[in-house]
Image (cartoon, rainbow, N blue to C red):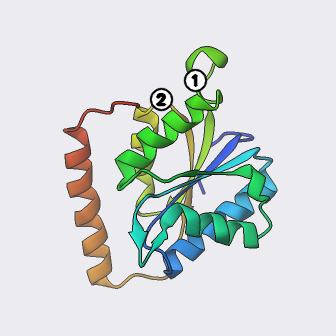
Amino acid sequence: MKGSLVSPLVVCVLGCRSGTPTLERRARSGAQAYLTRGATMVMVCGGRSWDGIVEADDLARMMTAQGVPATAIVRERCSLDTRDNARFGAALLRRRGVAGGERSEQGMRVLLVTCSWHLPRAESLFRRAGLEVEGYGVEPPVPTVGQQLYRHARERLSRWHDERREMRIV
């Protein structure tokens, strides 16, 4: 975990393929952060459907099973990638009056939970969307050299692509 925010108001957990150990690690870490850091809300992000299960719904189910009250969880179910997580998540928080805009003087403080290797790009995108972010990197099992190369190449290519796309908050 990195960052210096004292008490984030929202824990934001990014989705990935449903039914995977990666999603379970993120849900477990997000639930732990919610229960120990004094957050008031959890936003679960992910609109992709895997075998009929939407990422945000799967995250919400797992986090509820870990003790997070269902009433504290909001679902962002429109995003198909990390950039969408940031823009749709920021819009969702603004509609609830808890992120920037007229109702608050500062941006919403968000504890962003995702895999540690994915965190730098995710943090950058959430900041571009106008949110104050603290990263919470979830460590995966020790990766093979092939996995390391794939992750590095994926993030470099995705960052290049993200930088060329406009960040329009809906």
Locate residue 153, reporting x and y percent.
Answer: 22, 65
The amino acid at mark 1 is Gly
What percent of the width, then of the height, locates residue 82?
38, 52
Which residue does the numbered mark 1 point to in the structure image?
100
Cβ–Cβ below 8 Å for labels 2 and 1? yes
Which residue shows up at 52% across the image and 81% down it?
21
> 165 or 152: which is nearer to us?
165
Give residue 51's quadrant in the image. Answer: bottom left
Q: Is residue 20 left or right of residue 166?
A: right
Asked if residue 29 can be seen in this view, the reply is: yes
Alpha-carbon distance for marks 2 and 1? 7 Å
Q: Which residue is mark 2?
A: 130
The C terminus lies in quadrant: top left
Image location of residue 13, percent across then percent down? 57, 57
Element at label 1: loop
At a point 58% along the width and 30% down the height, the residue shown is 95
Query: Of the residues under marks 2 and 1, which one precedes in the sequence?
Result: 1
Q: Residue at x 39, y 42 (%)?
A: 125
